[in-house]
Every structure is written in C-alpha cells, then in structure tokens.
C-alpha cells in the first residue's frame, strides 16, 4: 500500500495527461448554423473572409484569448471591399454577437445609439425650423417642444435660420 503523501509543498508528479479531463470539442460553426441565407449574403462573395472555414474566429467567446481573437478578426476586416455592406447587414439585423464589418457587438450598439440620437436631433431641428418659419420665438418653441430656448438657438444655428433680435438675449 502506498504511503500517504506528506510533502504538500511539492507539486504532485503522478498525474498524467491522459488522466486530465478534457472539454469536449465543439463542432465548427457554419454560416447556415447562424441562420444566414445565401441571398442575404450575396456581398459575401467579395468579402475578405469568404474562404474562412472557421467563422468562429468572428464569434469569439469571452475569456483570456478573446481580445486576441477579436483583434485577428478585425485585422481581417481591414481593407475588405465589402466591409460597409457587412456592417450594414449586421446593423439591419441587430446582430448581437460577433465581428461584422470590423466592429464588435458592443461597438455596433454604440453606433446605433449615435444614429438614433442624430435622428432625434434632426427631427427636433426640423420642428424648430418649422415653428421658426411660423413666427414663434425661441421661448415659445422651447415651451412647445420641451427644450430650452438655448437649444432652440443652437438648432437654428445648425440650420442657419434667421434669428429674431430678441432670441439671442433669451439664451
């Protein structure tokens, strides 16, 4: 019978590689697995990644090597002739995972937030312009739209609208 081990300050050398449990390998991911049709990806024929047999590079898992994998995928997107189409596809589908058009899901969400803010600002600027043409003052427009007179003046500046003499004092 073997003697019990008492030298716990030394690493145990009796464990072999065959005794270490391994994680099961996950099968390779295909574009079909990602619910992507051929028609939706017609642009992919010109993509820099078109010959990749391992799209999982573009769908890195979280963990220690994720940053390197993301960097590798982004590098592949640099100079891709259909990078814009790829990004637009991902934005339109609200792809929540992976590298598309050289951006991560987090970066795409930030881009969409910026687009929404610009659309909201553009809508507000159109309303300010319409109400200015109707003869309302910055204060009246601000009250009607729920914004400050200063915001009205800034909106008018962006649109290069004529200001009433009294509006500049209100800001």
Image (tube, rainbow, N blue to C red):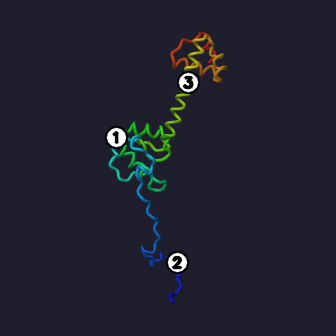
Q: CA distance from mark 3 to mark 1?
A: 34 Å
Label 1 sits on a secondary structure element that is loop
3 or 2: mark nearer the eye: 3
- Residue corresponding to mark 1: 80
Task: Say above or below: 119 vs 29.
Answer: above
Question: Hey, which quadrant is residue 99 in on the image?
Answer: top left
User: Residue 44 location, x and y as percent?
Assistant: 36, 42
Of pointers 1 and 2, the one earlier in the residue sequence = 2
Question: Hey, which quadrant is residue 125 in on the image?
Answer: top right
User: Residue 5 location, x and y as percent?
Assistant: 52, 82
Mark 1, residues whose alpha carbon is within 10 Å: few (<14), some, or many (≥20)?
A: some
On the rendered structure, is 162 left or right of 58? Answer: right
Of pointers 3 and 1, the one earlier in the residue sequence = 1
Between 129 and 169, the residue placed more toward the observer is 129
Q: CA distance from mark 1 to mark 2?
A: 55 Å
Question: Hey, which quadrant is residue 39 in on the image?
Answer: top left
User: Residue 100 location, x and y as percent?
Assistant: 43, 43
- Residue at the image position 52 percent from the left and 87 percent from the top: 3
Between 112 and 90, the residue placed more toward the observer is 90
- Residue at the image position 42 percent from the left and 50 percent from the top: 32
- Residue corresponding to mark 3: 123
User: Residue 74 location, x and y as percent?
Assistant: 39, 45
Number of marks in picture = 3
- Residue corresponding to mark 2: 8
On the rendered structure, is 39 left or right of 144? Answer: left
- Residue at the image position 51 percent from the left and 15 percent from the top: 160
């Amino acid at each position: 019978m073997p003697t019990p081990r008492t030298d716990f300050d030394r690493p145990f050398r009796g464990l072999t590689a065959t005794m270490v449990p391994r994680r099961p390998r996950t099968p390779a991911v295909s574009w079909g697995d990602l619910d992507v049709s051929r028609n939706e990806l017609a642009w992919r024929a010109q993509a820099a990644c078109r010959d990749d047999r391992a799209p999982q590079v573009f769908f890195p898992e979280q963990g220690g090597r994720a940053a390197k994998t993301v960097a590798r995928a982004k590098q592949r997107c640099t100079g891709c002739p259909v990078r814009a189409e790829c990004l637009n596809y991902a934005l339109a589908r609200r792809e929540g995972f992976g590298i598309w058009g050289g951006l991560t899901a987090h970066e795409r969400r930030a881009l969409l937030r910026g687009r929404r803010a610009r659309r909201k600002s553009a809508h507000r600027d159109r309303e300010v312009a319409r109400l200015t043409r109707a003869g309302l003052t910055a204060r009246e427009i601000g009250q009607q739209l729920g914004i400050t007179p200063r915001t009205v003046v800034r909106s008018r500046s962006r649109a290069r609208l004529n200001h009433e003499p009294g509006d500049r004092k209100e800001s």
